[in-house]
């Protein structure tokens, strides 16, 4: 029997291959093969794995930093393939993907607005992930090593601000993955910048 951290990499690699095949075969967004074949970027596949992460509980799941999520013990949590396939938590977003930027210049800002369906149960998690490829830093570099430091901020229509990863308004200047999770209410509007 194989389990534990030794099996996490091959399991996640297999899940990523299945998600990539889902896109390559054109199942997205209709669920019908051949409808819209596409080749997703590696950063998009990584974002899908991160967005599916489910909070772990139990002995050793959080260690000393249990008040924050993600954390060093469990990262973004348990990769949950069913979360990506469930129609209520699906990958589909009603938007114009052709209009999304493929490159960002210094000081560029992009804003996307999302409205939570009125039929959504109160407190349902609304998740947004920003993920990008960053070139390697200089070999002997010290300090903050991101070459491209992108920032994600989500604003609710009531004025509440949500910050990624550890929730600091200062931002995350270490990671090339930023995730915001909000307990959303039906009809709420969120603006991601």
Image: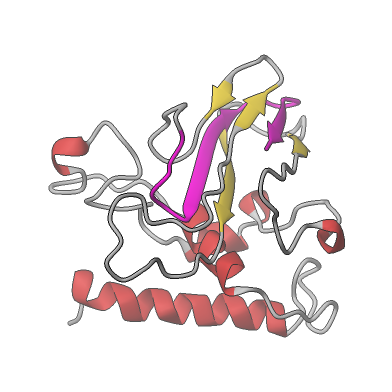
**Is residue 3 visible from the viewing direction of this image?**
no
Q: Measuring 57% from the left and 73% from the top, which residue is drawn there?
A: 42
Whether residue 145 is in magenta: the answer is no
The image shows residue 97, relative to residue 76, as above or below, that is: below
Extreme residue toward the top, this view = 158
- x and y percentages locating residue 178 in the rendered image: 49, 47
Q: How many marks?
A: 0
- Direction from residue 29 to residue 144 in the image, left or right: left
Q: Is residue 12 left or right of residue 135?
A: left
Depicted 95 relative to depicted 120: above or below = below
Closer to the camera, 7 or 130? Answer: 130
Q: Position of residue 24 (x, y in %)?
A: 70, 83
Q: Residue 49: give x, y in percent of width and height.
A: 49, 63
Q: Of 125 and 189, which appears nearest the observer?
A: 189
Looking at the rendering, in which quadrant would you find the N terminus?
Answer: bottom left
Q: Which residues are magenta?
A: 171-193
Residue found 46% across the figure and 35% down from its top: 171
Asked which quadrant contains residue 155, the reply is top right
Between 74 and 110, the one nearer to me in the picture? 110
Residue 136, quarter of the rendered image:
bottom left
Colouring mode (rainbow / by chain / secondary structure / one colour): secondary structure
Residue 125 percent coordinates (x, y)? 55, 37
The residue located at (85%, 63%) in the rendering is 98
**Residue 156 visible, this orientation:** yes
Does residue 71 sit above or below 29 in this rendering? Answer: above
- Name the quarter where the C terminus is drawn: top right
User: Going 55% across and 32% down the picture, which residue do you hit?
Assistant: 182
187 relative to 50 in the view: left or right: right
- Of residues 156 and 170, the one nearer the viewer is 170
Locate residue 147 relative to residue 2 in the image: left or right.
right
Q: Is residue 183 shown in magenta?
A: yes
């Amino acid at each position: 029997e194989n389990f534990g951290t030794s099996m996490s990499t091959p399991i996640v690699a297999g899940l990523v291959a299945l998600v990539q095949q889902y896109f390559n075969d054109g199942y997205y967004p209709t669920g019908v093969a051949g409808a819209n074949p596409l080749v997703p970027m590696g950063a998009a596949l990584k974002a899908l794995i991160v967005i599916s992460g489910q909070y772990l509980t139990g002995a050793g799941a959080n260690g000393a930093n249990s008040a924050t999520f993600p954390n060093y013990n469990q990262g973004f949590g348990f990769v949950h393939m069913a979360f990506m396939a469930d129609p209520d938590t699906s990958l589909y977003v009603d938007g114009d993907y052709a209009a999304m930027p493929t490159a960002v210049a210094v000081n560029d800002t992009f804003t996307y607005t999302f409205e939570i369906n009125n039929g959504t149960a109160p407190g349902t998690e609304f998740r947004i992930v920003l993920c990008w490829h960053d070139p390697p830093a200089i070999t002997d570099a010290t300090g903050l090593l991101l070459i491209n430091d992108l920032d994600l901020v989500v604003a609710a229509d009531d004025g509440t601000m949500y910050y990624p990863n550890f929730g600091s308004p200062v931002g995350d200047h270490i990671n090339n993955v930023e995730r915001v999770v909000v307990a959303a209410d039906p009809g709420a509007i969120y603006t991601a910048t």
